[in-house]
Amino acid sequence: MVILGAGPAGLVLANLLLRSGIDCVVLERTGRDDVRNRARAGFLAANTVRILERNGLDEGLRRHGQEHGVCEFRTGDGRFRLDYRRLGRGEPHTVYPQHELVADLLARFLDAGGRIRFATEAVAVHDADGPTPSVTVREEDGRPGRWRARYVAACDGRHGAGRRSLPPGAVHHHRDHGVSWLGLLAEAPPSLDAVGYALHPRGFAGHMARSAEITRYYLQCAPGTRADAWSEERIWDELDLRMRATEYGPLLRGPVVRRTVVDLWSDVLEPLRHGSLFLVGDAAALISPSAAKGANLAVLEAEILAHALTRALAHGDPDALDGYSQQCLVHIWRAQEFSHWMIGLLHQTPDSEDAHRFREGLRHARIAALRTSATQQHWFAENYVGV
Ligand code: RFL
C-alpha cells in the first residue's frame, strides 16, 4: 500500500493500516519539520476525537486539547451567544492545533515501525485501472523513482499527484465563493472566551482561541490581497473596528507571527475511487474553512478507508472497497452544505446593487433566525460540531 502525503488523512490511514498488519509506506513531499510545523486547523469535532480515541491516537489531544462550546455573533443589531455544547447533540469542539496532532500521529507511526519517505514528491499515479498501480516520484536528490503497490491512497491535498492522475471521466464540482480571508496567528491570549464571528459592513472578522498564548484571527479582505499587504497596526485597528471593541471590550494585541491569504473555495471530486486509486481528505474535497470541517472529514475518510482496505487486504474481501466513495460523499456534501450556509451568513459577497440589497435582507433574516429560534439553534449546533 502506498500513501501519498503525511497530513492528517495520510497519517491516520497509515497508523490504522499498520495496526492491522498491512504493509504500507508514506511518501511525503516536504521534510519532517515542515510536516510538524504547518499551522492550520484547530477545531476538532467530537466524532474526530472519538475516532482518534478508539484507535489509540488521542494521547496528546487528551492531555493538551481544550474543550470549547460557545460562539458569539456580533452584528450591527447587537451580540448574542450560542452555548452550542448544550444544543443539538450536546457536543463540544476540542481545540488542538493540527500540527500538534500531525506530530503525534507521525511519532506514533514511526514508533510502531512505520515507513515514511520525506522529501519524496509523488509525480503521478500510473495504471490505477489495473491490479498493479505504481507511483513515479522525485527523490530527495532529484532522481526519479517508482513505487509499486496493490493500492494507492492519495492523501496529498488539493495540488497533489492523486488529483493530477485522475482519468478523464472524473467529475470535478467546484465553486469559488469570491471571498478571501487574511488568516492570522497572533502571539496574544484569546480576547473572549468564545469563538467570535463579527458581521460588519467592512467585512467579516473572526476570533478563535488556539491556546492560552496564541489566537487565530480572520479578516475578510479583497480577493487578490497579498498576505504582507497590511501592517500589524492596520490589522489590529481593523479587527477592533469589525469586532466592535469599543462596545464589547478591547482585543488583546500581540505580534502577528503567521499570516496567509485563504481564498474561500470549495470542490468535490466524484467518485473518490478510480480502480486502485483512492482520494482522501483535501485530495477528495476541498472545503472552505468557514465551518472548520476539512481536517475532520480527512480523519473520518481515513478511518472508513482503513476499514475497507483491512477487509480487502487482510480478509480477502475486495468488495468492501466498493462503498468507500459513496459513504464518504454523503458526509462531504453534508459538510459542504453547512459550510456554504456559513459563508452566506458571514459575508457580503460582490454583487450588483439590487442583488446586494436582496442578499443583505436574506443575511439579516438568517442571523435573526439564529438569534431567536431554538429549532434553528439546535440545527446550527448539530451541523457546526458534526461531521
Ligand atoms: P494536508 O494537511 O494538506 O496534507 C497533505 C500532505 O501531502 C503532502 N503532499 C505531497 N506529498 C507527496 N507528493 C506530493 N505530490 C504531494 N503534494 C502534497 C503535503 O506536503 C502534506 O503534508 O491534507 P489532508 O491530510 O487531507 O488534511 C486536510 C486538512 O489539512 C485541511 O482540510 C484543514 O487544515 C482545513 N482547515 C480546518 N479544518 C478543520 O477541520 N478544522 C479547522 O479548524 C480548520 N481550520 C483549515 C483551518 C484550513 C486552513 N487553511 C490554511 C486552508 C484553517 C485554515 C487557515
Image (tube, helix red, strand yellow):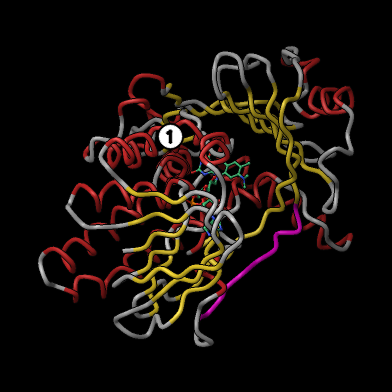
Between 36 and 295, the residue placed more toward the observer is: 36
Categorize mark 1 by other alpha carbons within 10 Å: few (<14), some (14-19), many (20+): many
Q: Main secondary structure of the magenta part?
A: strand
Q: Is residue 333 magenta?
A: no
Residue 136 located left or right of residue 65 = right
**Above or below, 236 relative to 307:** above
Quadrant of res 130: bottom left
Instruction: Check disc 1 and give the amino acid type.
Output: Leu
Q: In this view, does 216 lie above or below 326?
A: above
Q: x and y percent of residue 143 in the render? A: 57, 64
Please say whether residue 177 is one of the residues in the magenta stretch: yes
Tell me: 193 left or right of 274.
right
Comparing 73 with 39, the one in front is 39
> Which segment did they paint magenta?
170-179
Residue for badge 1: 101
User: As displayed, is residue 50 above or below residue 148?
Assistant: above
SS of the residue under disc 1? helix
User: Residue at coordinates 57% horizontally, 34% vertically from top-left?
Assistant: 37
For the point 63% across and 23% down, the residue is 215
**Residue furthest left in the image:** 315
- Kindly tell me whether mark 1's CB lies below 8 Å from ligand 1: no
Q: Where is residue 124 in the image (x, y as percent from the top left)?
A: 52, 73
- Horizontal side of residue 29 vs 87, given as left or right: right
Say which quadrant the N terminus sits in.
bottom left
Residue at x-position 77% and y-position 58%: 358
